[in-house]
Amino acid sequence: MYDITKVREDFPILQRKIYNRPLVYLDNGATTQKPRQVVEAMVDEYYNVNANVHRGVHFLSQQATDLHEASRETVRRFIHARSASEILFTRGTTESINLLAFSFGEAFVHEGDEILVSTMEHHSNIVPWQMMCQRKGARLKVIPISDDGLLDMEAYAQLLSEQTRLVCCTHVSNVLGTVNPVADIIRLAHQRGIPVLIDGAQSVPHMPIDVQALDCDFFAFSGHKVYGPTGVGVLYGKETWLEQLPPYQGGGEMIKTVRFEKTTYNDLPYKFEAGTPDYVATHGLAVAIDYVTALGMDNILAHEQQLTRYATQQLQQIDNMRIFGPTDHHDAVISFLVGHIHPLDLGTLLDRLGIAVRTGHHCAEPLMHRLGIEGTVRASFALYNTTAEVDALVASIRRVQQMF
């Protein structure tokens, strides 16, 4: 395990006070804080290596290009992809899924075809597929969940059909913390020759990922949730699939030749990376990945699981506490309601006590409808959170209860 006191020193924002109280940041499912190593690396590149990549013969351009492509290789190693050409840089999970929805839809989806998603998906893994289905005349089908927040795998197997073109499923629910059995989901789909997209936005920061071992066809995640900068993300795709997909956007970098009569497209991965990339952010993402790799993803997982178990036990002792999601197969997210206190009221008052949590539907309205609620309060943990912060959360909830 790592020294959490020393680690917290790498995150200056954790030393802040909010309303004269020490900040307890428990909104990591929305975005994580950034270690100084990431910020300093990005500042250094802007000051000393700033030049457009891939297009210049001068020294700065070559150096910036080397950093950018080294970042791609860092991502490849981190998720154990076979080739760096399978790593596409995007603006985040949302753009990654929109890219795939457009390109895959153009190549493989026709009227009457079906796309499967689960009940617990984030809006970014629902709306792009709805848009594609509307454009192509396809249908969106939904994998149900049980009352305790687990995917109904029998129903999933029954939904797979000759019309299914793609299965899209979150690895970890951003509301329930459910860790889905993605290996089984992929295996059942592949038995019918159906490719699978895994939304890894909530799993990449918390556990080791091996896309080859999972055998997923596509995998998406965001940099800002894994201690990297905002505005950068990744779409992994098996090379055999990416070669068959048309580009998502047109412009510079994604071309080989341009004539008014015809344009030929670039090789992977550049076919999907039109325009100037955020090459400083990709470098920042690589530094963030190096940071968590040095701590050890297994160590991070063990720390966060212990913290989540402790938090669950302590929260369950609060009167009228209602926690959503499974007790097993659970990641570093706890969504809850307390009595009849509206989640917005609870979140607002917790903020006045220095506790940063998320409130609302968490971009998962269909899941909220399934649960029969409008929203929850969500506490989500990261590698730098402590049991003392959990104790502060619990004490603050009790104090808010007394106000009501």
Image (spheres, grey):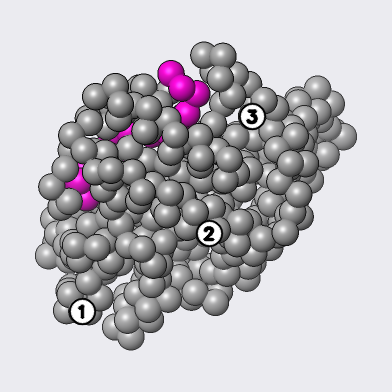
**Element type at marker 3?**
helix
Distance from label 2 to label 3 (Cα)? 21 Å
Residue at 56% of width from left, 14% of height from top?
Answer: 20
Residue 34, by quadrant, is top right
**Element type at marker 2?**
helix
Q: x%, y% of residue 351?
A: 43, 23
Residue 172, by quadrant, is bottom left
Is 307 or 170 nearer to us in this picture?
Answer: 307
Label count reads 3
Q: What residue did someone put label 3 on?
A: 14
Is residue 358 found left or right of 25 in the rendered image?
left
Residue 267, by quadrant, is bottom right
Sequence-wise, the earlier of marks 2 and 3 is 3
Is residue 23 found left or right of 126 in the rendered image?
right
The correct choice, above or below, for 153 with respect to 58 in the image is: below
The correct choice, above or below, for 128 with respect to 75 in the image is: above
Q: What residue did someone put label 1 on?
A: 154
Q: What residue did someone put label 2 on?
A: 305
Q: Amino acid at mark 3?
A: Leu
